[in-house]
Amino acid sequence: MDVDLLLWRLREHGDLAAFVDRVIGPLLAHDRAARPPLVPTLEAYLRHAGRKAETARALHLNRQTLYDRLARIGRLLGSDLEDPQTVLALSLALQARRHVR
C-alpha cells in the first residue's frame, strides 16, 4: 500500500494529528511566526536524502546558510537530522500533515 494512501486512510484518527504535532509541531509554529520558513528547507533536505550540497543548490542557498537553517531546525525539534529513525519520523510527519485537519 502506498504511504500517502495509508496516511489518508488514517486522516481522521487522532493519533495521526498528535504524531504530526509531536514530530514537527515546533517547526510549524516557527513558520507561522517567523521568517524564513524552515519547513521547505527540511522538505528539500529530506528529498535530497540529506545531501547538503544538492539541497543548498536546489534552494539557491550558500551552504553555510543551509547549515545554519538545519541547525535551527534541529534545535527547534530537539532532533538529530542525521539519525535514520528521526529522518523517517520527519518524512512521515511532513507527508501526514497534508491529510490531518
Image (cartoon, rainbow, N blue to C red):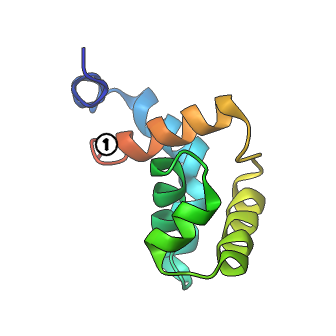
Disc 1 target residue = 100
Give above or below for 91 relative to 48: above
Q: Is residue 42 left or right of residue 75?
A: left
Give above or below for 13 relative to 24: above
Residue sitting at x 45%, y 66%: 40
In the figure, residue 85 lies in which quadrant?
Answer: top right
Residue sitting at x 50%, y 72%: 57
The percent position of residue 90, horizontal first and vertical second, equals 55, 42
The percent position of residue 28, horizontal first and vertical second, equals 51, 63
The total of numbered circles placed on residues is 1
Residue sitting farthest toward the bottom = 35
The percent position of residue 10, horizontal first and vertical second, equals 29, 25
Q: Which kind of residue does numbered mark 1 sit on?
A: Val
Task: Please rate how many residues cluster around mark 1, counting C-alpha atoms within 10 Å: few if below 14, some from 14 to 19, many from 20.
Answer: some
- Residue 90 shows in the view: yes
In the figure, residue 61 lies in which quadrant?
Answer: bottom right
- Asked whether 58 or 42 is in front, the reply is 58
The percent position of residue 76, horizontal first and vertical second, equals 71, 61
Say which quadrant the N terminus sits in: top left
Residue sitting at x 66%, y 36%: 86
- Asked whether 23 or 3 is in front, the reply is 3
- Asked whether 76 or 53 is in front, the reply is 53
Residue sitting farthest toward the top = 1
Residue sitting at x 56%, y 71%: 56
Q: Is residue 65 left or right of residue 14?
A: right
**Badge 1 element:** loop
- Residue 38 shows in the view: no
